[in-house]
């Protein structure tokens, strides 16, 4: 004998329906829209370059005049393309039409996150090494750890910047503007400006970025080539460049990237993973009187991460300056200062507040993330977008900051492998952590050094945000204490060290011709 | 009622990250005005897990264990309509240096309705519909899987149960259900999902489909049952090679177990269960045992 209690059932279904609509899964990413050029920077072709001898190191054959039949034919091609644009092409025109420099840094951050995972151990307890000659074979090359990422963003930024300085030099030599200036029938889908469009700054950035990223992420060549082609084509679809603008830009960008890659091959990164030389570092530390040296907390013990990254060539100062600014020795294990720092962590491990946990997680930037250099790269890109900087100023911001961040990594790694200070959990197993312990020694904190260097440079470039950048750097530094993977002195000295490193880039910025 | 616990157990068995509450899956109802209060302790352990579809162990994690101390109440509004609520306290630990987590997890409530109860041959056929919802009771850490006590998202569920019970006690039950899970927020503001980078702290948590089959024997003072259950996320990504789990993962598990219950007085019952994960994806190969007690009483007329 059944009776349906219909009203109850209806209520149930309605309630479920309401809850269902609130359980929506769409997640929103921030959107970056195109903006007009805010300044032309006619003298940017004279700005100081990093690797090129100057903005005029490379030249190109002069472009055809806008009255020439070759140019007019190109403009007709452009109009034909405009008449048959698909929705995808229009979207691409908007996507790339704002700031191509920022888009390539987005791509670099995504690769950084995708490649930031350490290899798994073999059955016999050894670890396999990524092989650049076989980048798609497990373990994939590269393992994009923080030092590798810092160098990747620096090389990308320097290549873009030097290439844009060269492009700006040529732009104002020949002054050939965008096709819409010469033909009213050309309608640009993105904001117009008076910047000479030959050679195309977008093609320059696409080519330079493409070659550098293929060098850094050799397993992603097909995708990178695809993005580069889309970037360049988007300029045709947007009606902003003719083909010869793009061809000239591509040729220039590629030539500049080749110079930066040649530099990169001599910057001693090739010897950063000198595992055979690690014993010498241990012997040197022992010789200085250190008894309890760092030991890997991975199980099985993993070889130290890039023990000779501290020997890589810095951008903004010499090797001897690097040695001169190396932080002094940390407190000795067992000393009152050391024990008090360890007591702070013992207490945090037991009584961490949820706010401290939040800060530790927010700044962790560990495995599967774009790393701390990537976090600051994102911050810089957001500031660039807020201030609507043109491409060459964007590249300058990123070059000044990224070279400082890589220099910070070099100074920090030099320090870590000089003192080989063990991590807190190695000294006291009861210090449980809220985040993974990276596979390198404690003193000084990488987060603190990277962050202080970035904040110093960004504070100089964006003075109205200087206090905010300092506060972020301090929080990033504290996050490692809250996570219980660094002593307070690792972080305080790291901040001082990073600020010093940043000041060299600031000095360069004051004298590179942009002010 | 006690099968709700089994679901929690199975969630524990799968891995603690499926520790969002599920609605009851059994074929029992409380008569009108009767209440039962249930307390249970469960413990699930694994040292192997599926990283995607690849089964492995991880010496950095060692052996993982989660315990669930649960309190539940069930009230008969009418003979055909019950309301239930439950709140678990979960504690996790491992051999890793990462801090084990503990805390009150999600508060769940369900309405269970029996539209169908018919004599059919030598027994009875019964049909049930259960709708439920759950909310996290605190802002517990959700991004330290597998040590997190839950995913910290709201859920809503709907399920149907069919049961045939012979008069002499043998029975079979089949049920299927769907759980909608909302978004959760994490403390960082970027993450990889489906191998793409997202610049936000909001994370989509996949919905879950589950189905189970049970065979048992029930008498007024005692019950024994064997069951097998399959639960699977409808969407989601795999744990990347040698990376950690994340709330977006497509978790799947096939679990089998035994349950037994005995009444020592008219009002007190004790129960125990044991289960093991047979197959899975982005889940722990867990063995779980549980024991608990239930007290029944009547209110009002």
Image (cartoon, rainbow, N blue to C red):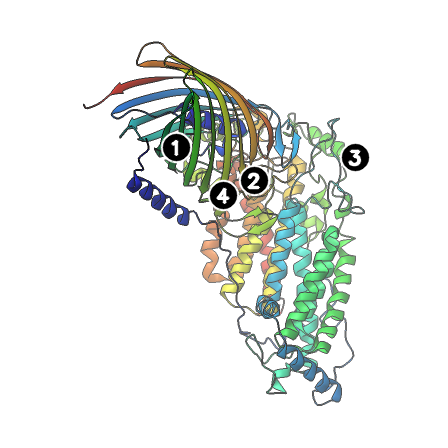
Question: Between disc 1 and disc 4, whose residue precedes?
Answer: 1
Residue at 72%, 58% in the rendered image = A212
Subunit bearing disc 3: A
Q: Is residue B90 left or right of residue B264?
A: right
Residue wearing tag 1: B128
Q: Secondary structure at mark 3?
A: loop
Vertical placement of A251 versus A23: above or below? below
Nearest to the eye among marks 2 and 1: give it. Answer: 1
Q: CB of mark 1 within 8 Å of CB of mark 3?
A: no
Residue at 32%, 26% in the rendered image = B74
Is residue A333 visible to us here?
A: no
Question: For the residues tagged 1 and 4, is the chain the same?
Answer: yes
Q: Is residue A323 left or right of residue B136?
A: right
- Residue reaching furthest left? B301
Question: For the residues tagged 1 and 3, is the chain the same?
Answer: no
Q: Residues within 10 Å of mark 1 (few under 14, many from 20)?
A: many
Foreground pick, B44 / A441: B44
Question: Where is residue B287 drawn, in percent x and y?
Answer: 55, 21
Q: Secondary structure at mark 1?
A: strand
Vertical placement of A291 versus A269: above or below? above
Question: Between disc 2 and disc 1, whose residue precedes?
Answer: 1
Question: Where is residue B3 drawn, in percent x and y?
Answer: 43, 25
What whole-number distance in Å separates the C-alpha atoms at marks 4 and 2? 9 Å
Residue wearing tag 4: B205
Nearest to the eye among marks 3 and 2: give it. Answer: 2
């Amino acid at each position: 004998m059944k009776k349906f209690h219909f009203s109850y059932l209806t209520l149930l279904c309605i309630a479920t329906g309401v809850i269902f609509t609130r359980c929506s899964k769409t997640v929103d990413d921030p959107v970056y829209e195109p903006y007009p050029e805010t300044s032309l920077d006619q003298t940017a072709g004279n700005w100081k370059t990093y690797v090129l001898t100057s903005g005029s190191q490379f030249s190109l054959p002069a472009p055809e005049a806008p009255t020439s039949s070759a140019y007019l034919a190109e403009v007709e091609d452009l109009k034909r393309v405009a008449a048959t644009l698909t929705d995808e092409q229009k979207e691409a025109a908007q996507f790339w039409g704002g700031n191509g420099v920022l888009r390539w840094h987005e791509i670099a951050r995504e690769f950084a996150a995708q490649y930031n995972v350490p290899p798994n151990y073999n059955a016999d307890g050894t670890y396999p090494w990524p092989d650049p000659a076989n980048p798609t074979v497990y373990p994939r090359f590269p393992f994009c750890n923080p030092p590798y990422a810092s160098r990747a963003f620096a090389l990308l930024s320097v290549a873009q910047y030097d290439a844009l300085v060269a492009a700006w030099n040529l732009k104002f030599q020949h002054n050939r503007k965008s096709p819409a200036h010469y033909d009213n029938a050309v309608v640009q889908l993105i904001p117009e400006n008076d910047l000479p469009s030959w050679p195309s700054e977008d093609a320059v950035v696409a080519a330079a970025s493409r070659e550098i990223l293929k060098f850094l992420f050799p397993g992603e060549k097909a995708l990178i080539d695809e993005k580069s082609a889309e970037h360049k084509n988007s300029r045709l679809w947007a009606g902003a460049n003719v083909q010869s603008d793009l061809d000239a830009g591509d040729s220039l960008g590629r030539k500049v990237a080749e110079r930066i890659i040649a530099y990169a091959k001599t910057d001693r990164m090739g010897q950063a993973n000198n595992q055979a030389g690690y014993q010498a570092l241990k012997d040197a530390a022992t010789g200085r009187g250190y008894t309890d040296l760092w030991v890997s907390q991975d199980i099985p013990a993993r070889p130290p991460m890039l023990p000779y990254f501290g020997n890589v060539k810095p951008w903004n100062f010499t090797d001897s300056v690097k040695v001169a600014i190396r932080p002094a020795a940390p407190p000795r294990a067992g000393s009152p200062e050391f024990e008090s720092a360890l007591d702070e962590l013992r207490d945090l491990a037991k009584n961490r507040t949820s706010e401290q946990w939040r800060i530790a997680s927010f700044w962790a930037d560990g495995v599967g993330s774009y790393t701390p250099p990537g976090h600051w790269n994102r911050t810089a890109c957001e500031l660039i977008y807020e201030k609507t900087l043109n491409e060459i100023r964007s590249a300058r911001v990123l070059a000044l900051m990224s070279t400082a961040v890589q220099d910070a990594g070099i100074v920090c790694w030099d320090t870590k492998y000089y003192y080989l200070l063990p991590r807190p959990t190695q000294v006291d197993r009861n210090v449980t952590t809220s985040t993974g312990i990276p596979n390198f020694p404690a003193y000084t904190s990488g987060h603190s050094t990277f962050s202080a260097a970035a904040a110093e440079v960004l504070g100089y470039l964006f003075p109205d945000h200087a206090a905010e950048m300092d506060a972020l750097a301090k929080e990033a530094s504290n996050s490692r204490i809250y996570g219980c993977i660094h002593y307070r002195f690792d972080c305080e000295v790291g901040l001082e060290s990073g600020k010093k490193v940043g000041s060299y880039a600031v000095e360069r910025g004051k004298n590179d011709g942009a002010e | 009622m006690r099968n709700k616990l089994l679901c929690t157990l199975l969630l524990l068995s799968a891995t603690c990250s499926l520790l969002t509450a599920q609605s009851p899956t059994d074929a029992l109802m409380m008569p009108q005005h009767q209440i039962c209060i249930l307390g249970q302790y469960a413990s699930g352990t694994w040292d192997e897990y599926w990283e995607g579809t690849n089964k492995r162990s991880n010496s950095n994690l060692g052996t993982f264990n989660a315990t669930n101390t649960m309190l539940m109440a069930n009230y008969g509004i009418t003979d055909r309509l019950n309301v239930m609520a439950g709140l678990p306290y979960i504690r996790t630990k491992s051999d890793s240096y990462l801090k084990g987590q503990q805390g009150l997890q999600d508060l769940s409530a369900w309405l269970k309705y029996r539209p169908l109860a018919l004599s059919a041959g030598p027994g009875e056929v019964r049909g049930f519909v259960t709708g439920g919802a759950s909310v996290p009771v605190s802002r517990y850490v959700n991004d330290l899987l597998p040590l997190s006590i839950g995913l910290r998202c709201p859920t809503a569920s709907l399920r149907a149960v069919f049961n045939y019970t012979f008069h002499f006690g043998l029975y079979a039950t089949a049920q299927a259900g769907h759980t909608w899970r909302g978004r959760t927020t994490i403390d960082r503001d970027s993450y990889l999902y489906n191998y793409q980078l997202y610049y936000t702290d909001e994370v989509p948590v996949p919905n879950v489909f589950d189905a189970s089959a049970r065979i048992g024997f029930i008498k007024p003072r005692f019950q024994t049952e064997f069951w097998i259950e399959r639960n699977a996320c409808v969407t989601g990504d795999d744990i990347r090679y040698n990376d950690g789990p994340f709330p977006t993962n497509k978790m799947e598990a096939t679990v089998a177990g035994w349950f037994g219950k005995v009444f020592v007085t008219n009002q007190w019952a004790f129960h125990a269960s044991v289960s093991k994960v047979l197959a899975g994806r982005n889940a722990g190969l867990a063995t779980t045992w549980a024991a608990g007690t239930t007290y029944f009483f009547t209110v009002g007329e």
